Structures are given as structure tokens and as C-alpha cells.
Amino acid sequence: MERKPKVTQQAVDAACEELQQAGKNASVNAVIAIAGGSFSTVGPMVKAWRAEQQKKAAPAIEMPESITNAMYQATAVVWEAAASLANERIERARTEAQDALAQSRSELSEYMGAIASLEQQLDKTQKSLTSAEKRLSMTASEIAQLNTHKVSLETRLADRDSELKQLREDYKKLQADLVAIAKTGKDKH
């Protein structure tokens, strides 16, 4: 296995210069893409190159104290205005959030009332359903009893029909016997 040569500060500096001349940011990943190496190795080298660049870019002359003081005062005024503006926006956002929270709580209260009402309606409906189921069960029981009674009556009616049929047959037989007796009695006279 072939080992890669170690990246040097000179190679990293050259890669950073190349990126800067191309108008690109000299990031650690971009430098690694050009010069190779690892993030842990190249990262400190890129930082060292940046520090060197800042030293080169430092102003050669010092500003007079009056200008420095004026800059600090101007910065303080700008900071105070920015802080005031930020505080106003924060207060407006806080007020809007409190209003939205109050509105949400109001809506929640309304929804909770609606839920309670629906739960009461559900309870009433369930009680009505239970009552209707009991009535249905009782009606079904009564229907079963009536069906049993009907079957019993139909059985009795069938028995009576059978008896009636037997009685008619007996009647016809007796009538035939009576006619035969009457004919025999006429013949003897």
C-alpha cells in the first residue's frame, strides 16, 4: 500500500493563494481538494495562513485617538439605536404572542365546552340505545313466546282437524251402516 506524502504548510499556503486569486473562499475542504491531507492536519495550517494574511493586511498607520473615540461613540450610538429597535420588536412580538396565547386559550375553552356538550349528548344517546336494546330484547322474548303459543295452537288445530276428519269418516260409516240396516229392515217386511 502506497502512503501519501504529508501535506506541508507551503502546499497549503499555495492552495489558499490559488483559491483567493480565483475569488473563492479558502475553506479547509477546498484546500484538501487541491493539496490533499486530512481535516485535522490541514485545518490548523489554513488558520495559520489566515493569521498571516491578517497581519499583512493590518494598517501601517495608527489612527488618532480623537478618531478612535469618535468611532467608539458612533458605534455606541448605533448599538443603542439597534438595541432600542430590537427591544421594541421583542416587546411587539411578546405582546402578539400573549394575544395569540389568550386567543388560543379562549378557543381551547370553547372547544372544551363543545367536547363536554358532545360527551353529554353521547351519554344520553348511549342511555337511549341501552333502553331501546332492552325493549328490543323484551319484544324479541314476547315474539318468541307468541311463536311458541302459535305452534301450540297450530298443533292443537291440526289435532282437531284430524279428529274432525275421523269423526266425518265415522259418521259416513255409521250413515252407511244405518242405510244398510234400513234396507235390511225393509227387505224383511
Image (cartoon, rainbow, N blue to C red):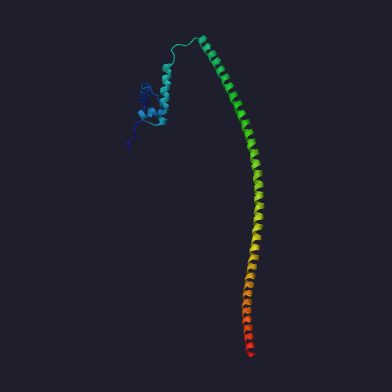
Q: Residue furthest front?
A: 189
**Splitting the image into 4 quarters, where does residue 115 fall?**
top right
**Front-most of residues 97 and 134:** 134
Q: Position of residue 133 (x, y in %)?
A: 64, 54
> Quadrant where the N terminus lies?
top left
> Quadrant where the C terminus lies?
bottom right
**Front-most of residues 149 and 179:** 179
Q: What residue is at 41 percent from the left and 31 percent from the top?
A: 39
**Front-most of residues 180 and 78:** 180
Give left or right: position of 21 versus 151: left
Q: Position of residue 107 (x, y in %)?
A: 62, 34
Q: Residue furthest left?
A: 2
Q: Position of residue 167 (x, y in %)?
A: 64, 77
User: How many discs mark residues in the rendered view?
Assistant: 0
* 42 over 139 or under it: above or below: above
* 126 over 69 or under it: above or below: below
Q: What residue is at 64 percent from the left and 36 percent from the top?
A: 110
* 62 over 24 or under it: above or below: above
**Splitting the image into 4 quarters, where does residue 98 fall?**
top right
Q: What residue is at 64 percent from the left and 85 percent from the top?
A: 182
Q: Position of residue 83 (x, y in %)?
A: 57, 20
Give left or right: position of 128 versus 83: right
**Splitting the image into 4 quarters, where does residue 162 fall?**
bottom right
Q: What residue is at 63 percent from the left and 37 percent from the top?
A: 111
